[in-house]
Amino acid sequence: MNRTGSPPTTMKKPLWISVGLIALLAVGYIGAPFLTAWNIREAVRNGNSAYLTTAIEWPSVRETLKPSIARIALDLPNAEQTEPANPSLWQRAKAYWGRGAIDSLVDSYVTPEGLPQLFTVQKTYRDYVSGDDGTNALPILERVSRAWARVKRAEFTGFTTFEIDMADKNDETRLYLGKLELTRVGWKLAELRVEFLKPATITIQNFAGTL
């Protein structure tokens, strides 16, 4: 008993409770964008369009994805490359008409219903060509571990923004660059881009992974 007649630990309990709550909130804040990214991945795989509707800012994702898809499909120069001073008629037509066609396809298929369908078609083709690798039958912790191994970068770029770069499961040269933003209803995917690693970059990363 102290001079006030109360147990010595009475005044300490609120402090420990506050510290515990702060730590819990910090863990939840840090883990939330990772959980959102995983849930989006699972929703695409399982065709959960209802979740995808609320977890993705579709207009901004489509707009950031269009240049990447057009560059890959039409073999257009990226932002780091200099365009030819006198492009040929075919190059001009490809850039104008081809880009319009790609943009229309993205608008049509990058939707809560279309994205799972594209994944199903892609998976069916790969299973037919190379066979099912059995990933879906693995325990959840093993699947999370394999997915985490493909993450090249994950960091908060602001209090309400988080970026994650992940390599494609079947092509390590292809990177998906996602940006999530914290909204009133939680974290949402706001931007998505696709890039390819240069051969030199791949060599350096593979060497670093052996150290």
Image: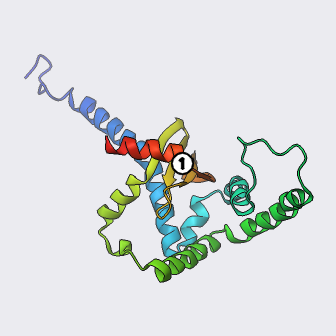
The image quarter containing residue 91 is bottom right
- The residue sitting at 69% across, 71% down in the picture is 109
- The residue sitting at 89% across, 56% down in the picture is 92
In depth, the one of 2 and 148 nearer the eye is 148
Q: Is residue 51 left or right of residue 83?
A: left
Query: Where is residue 18 drawn, in percent x and y?
Result: 31, 33
Q: Which residue is mark 1?
A: 199
Q: Is residue 4 left or right of residue 33?
A: left
- The residue sitting at 58% across, 54% down in the picture is 189
Q: Is residue 65 left or right of residue 92?
A: left
Q: Which amino acid type corresponds to the residue marked 1 in the rendered image?
A: Pro
Q: Is residue 186 left or right of residue 91?
A: left
The image quarter containing residue 7 is top left
Rendering colour mode: rainbow
In depth, the one of 205 and 86 nearer the eye is 86
In depth, the one of 96 and 160 nearer the eye is 96
Query: Under tag 1, what secondary structure?
Result: helix
Where does the C terminus fall, quadrant-wise? top left
Where does the N terminus fall, quadrant-wise? top left
Q: Residue furthest top?
A: 3
Q: Residues within 10 Å of mark 1 (few under 14, many from 20)?
A: few
Query: Where is residue 93 drawn, in percent x and y?
Result: 89, 61
Query: Where is residue 209 drawn, in percent x and y?
Result: 36, 45
